[in-house]
Image (cartoon, rainbow, N blue to C red):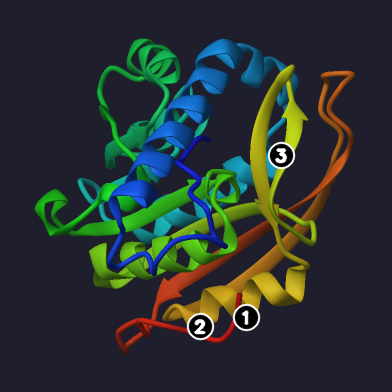
Amino acid sequence: MTTDPTSANTGPPEDSPSGAASNARNARRAAQALAFDRIGARYDEAFPHKQEQLAAGEWLAVRLEPGSRVLDVGCGTGMPTARQLVDAGLRVTGIDISAGMLDLARAAVPEASFHQADVMDLDATWGRFDGVVAFFSLLMLPRQQIMAALRLLHSLLTPAGLLMLAMVEADLDDVELPFLGSPVRLTGYPHDQLRAVVEATGFEVVEQRHRTYAPEHEDTPPETQQFLYCRRGTQAAPSRSNIT
């Protein structure tokens, strides 16, 4: 589920990072990667029931032709999503900044291609994708970076491409919280605001679902999960937006 958070409130704009901003981003990436290296397989143990995530994956799979390319952003252990999509005949590329998570993913889904990479480092050299899944990965970014990540993913999708996005409903921006025994920085939106953010970055929200989820881990409180089923809009995503 991991991606790299960077500061939303300090430094220059994201399209012209200074050396200091770059150093800060690298330091935070390393801290986040270390946290999820430590969490490892305990993530799936704490979140064993993923019916809504599986339903979203199925919605995507039945709308794509066999052999279509899908990008799994913050693939984690590869379970259940990369496994589900590969079994549906899709070509899956997974990215995560945690080497430990990627080791688990490669063992669980050897048919997929996994890379240690940050969502904000993606560019046109990765090619175009017919679908993107980002299940509980963009919440690791501050709001400013979530907007940038969504615009980037919009640019990597084919014209009829689909995005499946999952976030935890909360009104917070880049706040450090304990997660399975490790400190991580998390961001959330109220459900109406999340939809507005996604639409502002060029996507059409086809469906939005909510589910209250109680993790198995005693230190992780119940949460409201949001699932957005999205289609790439016909117009390019705007470079800036007043919505944050």
Name which residue type carries label 2: Ala
- Residue 108: quadrant of the picture: top left
Horizontal side of 217 relative to 174 (left or right) equals: right
The disc, 1 or 3, on the residue closer to the chain's N-terminal end is: 3
The residues tagged by marks 1 and 2 sit, at their Cα atoms, a distance apart of 6 Å
**Residue on which the image places disc 1:** 196
Mark linked to residue 200: 2
Marks 1 and 2 in Cβ contact (< 8 Å): yes
* Residue depicted at 37% across the width and 12% down the height: 103
Taking depth in this image into account, of 8 and 70 the one nearest to the observer is 8
Q: Position of residue 69 (x, y in %)?
A: 23, 49
**Where is residue 186 drawn, in percent x and y?**
66, 45
Determine whether the residue tagged by mark 1 lies in a helix, strand or loop.
helix
Front label number (1 vs 3): 3
Residue visible at 37% across and 31% down?
87
Q: Residues within 10 Å of mark 3 (few under 14, many from 20)?
A: few
Image location (x, y in percent) of residue 135: 55, 45
Residue kind at label 3, given as amino acid type: Glu
Q: Amino acid at mark 1?
A: Ala
- Residue 104: which disc? none
Of callouts 2 and 3, the N-terminal one: 3
Numbered mark located on residue 176 in the image = 3
Disc 2 residue crowd, few under 14, some 14–19, many 20+, Cα 10 Å: many
Q: Secondary structure at mark 3?
A: strand
